[in-house]
Image (spheres, grey):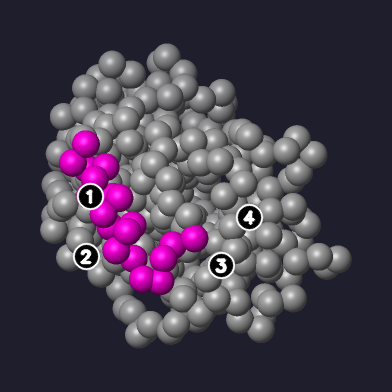
Amino acid sequence: MEKRIPTNIITGFLGVGKTTTILNLLKNKPDNEKWGVLVNEFGEIGIDGAILTEQGAQIKEVPGGCMCCTAGVPMSVGINALLRTKPDRLLIEPTGLGHPKKVVATLISPQYEKYVDLKATIALVDPRNLSNTKYTENQNFNDQLDTADVVIGSKVDQCTVADIDAFNDWITDQAPAKTFSKLIKHGELPLEVLDNVRLHGSASSQIEDHHHEHAEMEPQFQLPPGQTYIRKENSGQGYKSCGWLFGPEVEFNFDDLFSMLSDLTAERVKGVINTDQGCFTFNKANGVLSVNNLSLQGFESRLEVIDSQLLPWDQLEKVLIKLADIE
């Protein structure tokens, strides 16, 4: 390769708006540049890749919990495929339950030092979570913030003055200091932040090997021939997920689906779903369900539900089958 590719890790816990932020970055990137995005999700279905594909970037997915497992092979396969397309910039979105230090260590290893110019690691945090022990006592939550060179307070439009004060106090107390911090809404991260430098040595320390249960890592979860839908589960780090993939011929009733997802008591819900009113993304975090229209056609519907408790997946599946009118 003629030059090292500027690369950023964009990390953050479940529901902080990583995908929304990357979508905004892709919408505002220079027209003459080609960007690559490596997406990792805790679930097995691969929702984010479907959402980001609309923006024309080169997308590679690593489903199944943690891209740095199995000696980093799934991550390396995805990075290598993207580097072969000679992108002008590479963005890496680890799962909200991922291990950012291990990802950083891989990117600055001899394997990639000639090809990847690792810039600042950017962590998104919902300021409301800084006052909640459910998050502040979670090791991954703290690892993500500790690893970051840049910390962005997201969803500021949903925060109180006390939430913003908590964010500012946290930033002030950091040692070494972060290179940059900012409060944003709707994922509106300025492009120039991507060129902030990495704090050498602060994020690349090794961490203990971790082990968690997940299915084999596939480059893309596929619906077997002859099947209308399939379900896959994953667990690890205190969380459970269940995902469904439905064939492109399956169409859900929008109103009934919206009502069901609104009532669903899960910590995180993401989906790209064909309905009788078109294709939509469904995104639920902090109890709020947001919906956006997509121009995708002929695409399999995907739904992922994540919670710290084991939910009644069989019962939920029966509801989905009824809403899709599958016999």
Q: Nearer the viewer, mark 4 or mark 2?
A: 4
Circles 4 and 2: CB atoms closer than 8 Å: no
* 306 in relation to 112, above or below: above
Instruction: Say which residue label 3 marks.
Output: 198
Instruction: Say which residue label 4 marks.
Output: 195
Badge 4 crowding class, 10 Å Cα cut-off, few under 14, some 14 to 19, many 20 or more, is few
Q: Is residue 20 magenta?
A: no
The answer to which of marks 4 and 2 sits earlier in the sequence is 2
The answer to which of marks 3 and 2 sits earlier in the sequence is 2
Q: Nearer the viewer, mark 3 or mark 1?
A: 1
SS at mark 3 in the image: loop
Residue 323: percent from the left, percent from the top?
A: 27, 25
Q: Which mark is residue 138?
A: 2
Badge 3 crowding class, 10 Å Cα cut-off, few under 14, some 14 to 19, many 20 or more, is many
Circles 3 and 2: CB atoms closer than 8 Å: no
Asked whether residue 327 is in view, the answer is: no
- Residue 239 as seen in the image, left or right of residue 312: right
Q: Nearer the viewer, residue 90 or 132?
A: 132
Q: Residue at x 66, y 43 (%)?
A: 57
Q: Which stretch appears magenta?
A: 161-179
Q: Residue at x 21, y 22 (%)?
A: 259
Q: Nearer the viewer, mark 2 or mark 1?
A: 1
Q: CA distance from mark 2 to mark 1?
A: 17 Å
Q: CA distance from mark 4 to mark 1?
A: 27 Å
Residue 211: percent from the left, percent from the top?
A: 32, 78
Q: CA distance from mark 3 to mark 4?
A: 9 Å
Circles 4 and 1: CB atoms closer than 8 Å: no
The answer to which of marks 4 and 1 sits earlier in the sequence is 1
SS at mark 1 in the image: helix
Q: CA distance from mark 3 to mark 2?
A: 24 Å
